[in-house]
Image (cartoon, rainbow, N blue to C red):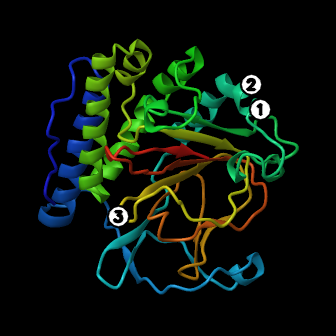
């Protein structure tokens, strides 16, 4: 695996230094285990599936799809990876910390719910579990406004607290991306460094105050809690980039369905699915599950900025 270096140094004092160190360790450990040895970790069999596209099918049809439960990758006809399936990637302690971190944003989550079809499916209250104590969907980013979006939850105190609490998880997710897509990791880190330089130029103290603790290589996080994900493709994405999805919570068994492939992947808590969301239609096969899906969604602008989501 060729290590990808960023063009610019990470600014002094940024927590991104922690992410960079963890990513370098994970890349080195992966290369040692896979290519060189001696092996310390248990053998991991990665099943390779060739991509076979089809049209959208309804939920009933998805019950006939093959269910995948083992670590897998999906390749297109040119050998490009379109999906990684990594069950059990995040341990229970980190899952619990992720869930507990949401309570500080409970008011913002509830306020985010809107009447059907007014603000897109991500905030459609019909898709959220009616009996859940915690539910909603919000977008957070140090560069959200600079990407041309409307104002979202960027500079409030509870967001700073949440980013602080999520620093270990963000470093692990970023390290995972460094292993499975090193070019995207390097591009995401470079974009955040560029945002830091722009913040200094604009004298944007709000953005500067969040960037130094933002140690995720994606520059936006959308948080969606206790919600159904309908079948969709990510219209703002770029096909070579990967969305990173992770579910946490206590819920009945469910699957992430990929109608494009006629496959469904068991979505146990702690599972990571990295997927080309603009190429592969995807959604859940269970309505209103109790839990939170953590997903990183790359969006490309003139500056190749990325965004992340937690669903």
Kindly identify which residue carries mark 1: 110
Q: Earlier in the sequence, mark 2 or mark 3?
A: 2
Q: Tag 1's secondary structure?
A: helix
Kindly identify which residue carries mark 3: 240
156 is higher (above) or lower (below) than 74? above
Label disc, if present, on residue 95 of the rendered structure: none
Circle count: 3
User: At which x and y percent is residue 121?
Assistant: 71, 53
119 is higher (above) or lower (below) than 162? below
The residue sitting at 32% across, 30% down in the picture is: 195
User: At which x and y percent is residue 173?
Assistant: 40, 45
The residue sitting at 34% across, 51% down in the picture is: 177
Q: Specify whether 178 is left or right of 50.
A: left
Kindly identify which residue carries mark 2: 107
The residue sitting at 48% across, 34% down in the picture is: 144
Asked if disc 2 and disc 1 are in contact, CB closer than 8 Å, the reply is yes
Q: Tag 3's secondary structure?
A: loop
Q: Specify whether 83 is left or right of 115.
A: left
> What is the spatial separation of the Cα atoms under label 2 and label 3, in whole angstroms?
36 Å
Asked if disc 1 and disc 3 are in contact, CB closer than 8 Å, the reply is no
Disc 2 versus disc 3: nearer the observer: 3
> What is the spatial separation of the Cα atoms under label 2 and label 1, in whole angstroms?
5 Å
- 10 Å crowding of disc 1: few (<14), some (14-19), many (20+): some
């Amino acid at each position: 695996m060729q290590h990808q270096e960023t063009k610019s140094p990470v600014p002094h004092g940024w927590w991104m230094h922690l992410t960079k160190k963890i990513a370098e360790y994970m890349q080195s450990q992966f290369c040692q285990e896979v290519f060189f040895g001696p092996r310390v970790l248990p053998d991991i069999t990665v099943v390779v599936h060739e991509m076979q596209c089809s049209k959208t099918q309804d939920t009933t049809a998805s019950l006939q799809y093959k269910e995948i439960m083992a670590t897998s990758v999906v390749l297109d006809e040119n050998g490009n990876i379109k999906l990684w399936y990594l069950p059990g990637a995040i341990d229970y302690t980190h899952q619990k910390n992720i869930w507990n971190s949401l309570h500080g944003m409970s008011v913002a989550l509830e306020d985010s719910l809107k009447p059907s079809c007014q603000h897109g499916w991500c905030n459609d209250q019909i898709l959220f579990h009616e009996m859940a104590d915690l539910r909603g969907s919000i977008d957070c980013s140090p560069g959200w406004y600079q990407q041309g979006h409307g104002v979202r939850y960027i500079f409030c105190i509870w967001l700073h607290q949440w980013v602080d609490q999520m620093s270990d998880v963000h470093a692990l997710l970023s390290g995972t991306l460094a292993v499975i897509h090193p070019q995207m990791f390097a591009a995401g880190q470079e974009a955040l460094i560029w945002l830091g330089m722009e913040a200094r130029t604009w004298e944007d103290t709000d953005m500067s105050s969040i960037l130094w603790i933002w140690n995720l290589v994606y520059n936006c996080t959308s948080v969606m809690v206790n919600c159904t994900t309908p079948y969709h493709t990510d219209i703002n994405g770029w096909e070579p980039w990967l969305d990173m999805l992770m579910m946490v919570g206590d819920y009945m068994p469910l699957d992430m369905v990929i109608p494009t492939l006629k496959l469904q992947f068991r979505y146990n808590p702690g599972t990571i699915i990295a997927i080309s969301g603009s190429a592969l239609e995807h959604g859940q096969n269970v309505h209103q599950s109790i839990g939170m899906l953590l997903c990183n969604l790359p969006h490309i602008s003139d500056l190749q900025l990325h965004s992340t989501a937690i669903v």
